[in-house]
Image: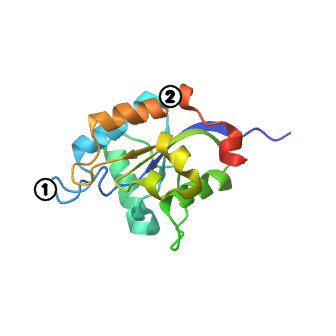
């Protein structure tokens, strides 16, 4: 008999405007923002799936993993598909469905400087409860971490039929 899929909580991570504030002088993978991401991982036990445009090249994926490790965080477990014609929310939903045999996503938060709920179409209600929209110039903040921790809490877990139905 096959093992049931492992239950996980996922952070779908964008990089630019999240851990790499735009237009700032702090540089990419800014230490303060990376420390906040680490705090979220520690608070929730979540894993990272890369939804950033950094996922589209070998170099970009390697840089993200290198910077995660440099900041004492585990590698990301995967990347959303690149639907060049599609919206990031569709790519996230595709990843969840494509990996359901291996991973049962019981909860997720998408952290992005794009207002994902506003472009989520049929999934708007889901992304209203499971997305953090950062200020791209400022990047990830303590308040974002507080909100994301709440969103990843067991009280906000997603019924399987809402994700896989």
Disc 2 designates what residue? 153
Which residue is tagged 1?
25
Residue 10 on image: x %, y %: 52, 42
Residue 130 in the image: above or below residue 94? above
Res. 23 image quadrant: bottom left
Residue that extends furthest to the bottom in the rendered view of this protein: 85
Identify the residue shown where x is 55% and y is 60%.
91
Question: Mark 1 falls on what kind of element?
Answer: loop
The residue drawn where x is 48% and y is 44% is: 128
Q: Quadrant of residue 161?
A: top right
Give the residue furthest to the left: 25
Instruction: Give the answer, above or below, for where 158 lies relative to 125.
Output: above
Dot 2 and dot 1 residues touching (CB under 8 Å):
no
Residue 119, position in %: x, y?
47, 59
Q: Is residue 3 visible?
A: yes
Q: Is residue 130 visible?
A: no
In this picture, residue 32 sits left or right of residue 115: left
Secondary element at image label 2: loop
Q: Nearer the viewer, residue 95 or 67?
A: 95
Which is more toward the observer, 106 or 30?
A: 106
Which quadrant, please, contains the N terminus? top right
Q: Residue at x 52, y 73 (%)?
A: 85
Q: Is residue 15 left or right of residue 123?
A: left
Q: CA distance from mark 2 to mark 1?
A: 34 Å
For discs 2 and 1, the disc positioned in front in the rendered view: 2
């Amino acid at each position: 008999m096959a093992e049931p899929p492992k239950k996980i909580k996922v952070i779908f991570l964008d990089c630019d405007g999240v851990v790499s504030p735009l237009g700032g002088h702090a540089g990419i993978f800014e230490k303060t923002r990376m420390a906040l991401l680490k705090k979220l991982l520690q608070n929730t036990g979540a894993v990272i799936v890369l939804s950033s445009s950094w996922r589209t090249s070998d170099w970009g994926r390697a840089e993200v993993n290198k910077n995660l490790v440099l900041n004492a965080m585990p590698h990301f477990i995967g990347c959303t598909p690149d639907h060049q014609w599609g919206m990031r929310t569709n790519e996230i939903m595709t990843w969840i469905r494509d990996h359901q045999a291996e991973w049962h996503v019981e909860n997720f938060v998408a952290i992005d400087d794009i207002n994902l709920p506003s472009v989520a179409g049929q999934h708007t209600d889901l992304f209203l409860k499971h997305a953090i929209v950062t200020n791209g110039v400022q990047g990830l903040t303590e308040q974002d971490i507080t909100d994301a921790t709440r969103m990843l809490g067991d009280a906000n877990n997603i019924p399987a039929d809402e994700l896989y139905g």
